Image: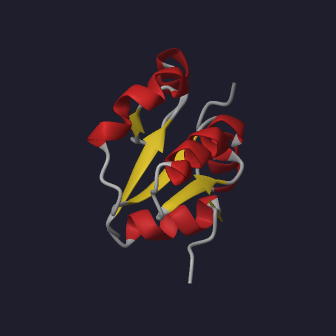
Amino acid sequence: MSMPTEISVTELKALLDSKADVIVIDVREPHEYQIANIGAKLIPLGAFGGHVAELDPDQHYIIHCRSGKRSAEACGLLRAMGFARVQNLAGGILAWADQIDPTMQKY
């Protein structure tokens, strides 16, 4: 059974709270990361291709951006390179701010 291509912010929060073996990657720009972040590893989309070699194809990755568009692109790139356990965070950090952390600054 293949993994769903998207994950909701509530599902991600549950995974993080359970200390699941998952790596979250933020593909936004550094200035966006400074405004609001959930502690993910920052690899901006423009530089993403150059960092793929550092990633483990067997690891579970959840990719996010501001709203989900850039992270969907990064997920597609990883899947095309044989990464099977890659999910896009539906709604991105805006959904996280709406549903998980209302104190988070939106932009």
Q: What residue is at 69 percent from the left and 54 percent from the top?
A: 90
Point out residue 73 in the picture as x, y percentages from the top left corner: 64, 39
Q: Residue furthest front?
A: 81
Q: What residue is at 57 percent from the left and 76 percent from the top?
A: 2
Q: Residue furthest top?
A: 31
**Position of 8 relative to 2 (above/below):** above
Point out residue 101 in the picture as x, y percentages from the top left corner: 58, 49
Q: Nearer the viewer, residue 52 or 69?
A: 52
Hey, which quadrant is residue 60 in on the image?
Answer: bottom left
Q: How many marks?
A: 0
Point out residue 68 in the picture as x, y percentages from the top left corner: 69, 43
Q: Nearer the viewer, residue 67 or 4?
A: 4
> Is residue 67 visible in the rendered structure shown here?
no
**Position of 27 relative to 78 (above/below):** above
Question: In what quadrant of the picture does the C terminus appear?
Answer: top right
Question: In what quadrant of the picture does the N terminus appear?
Answer: bottom right
Q: What residue is at 67 percent from the left and 30 percent from the top?
A: 106
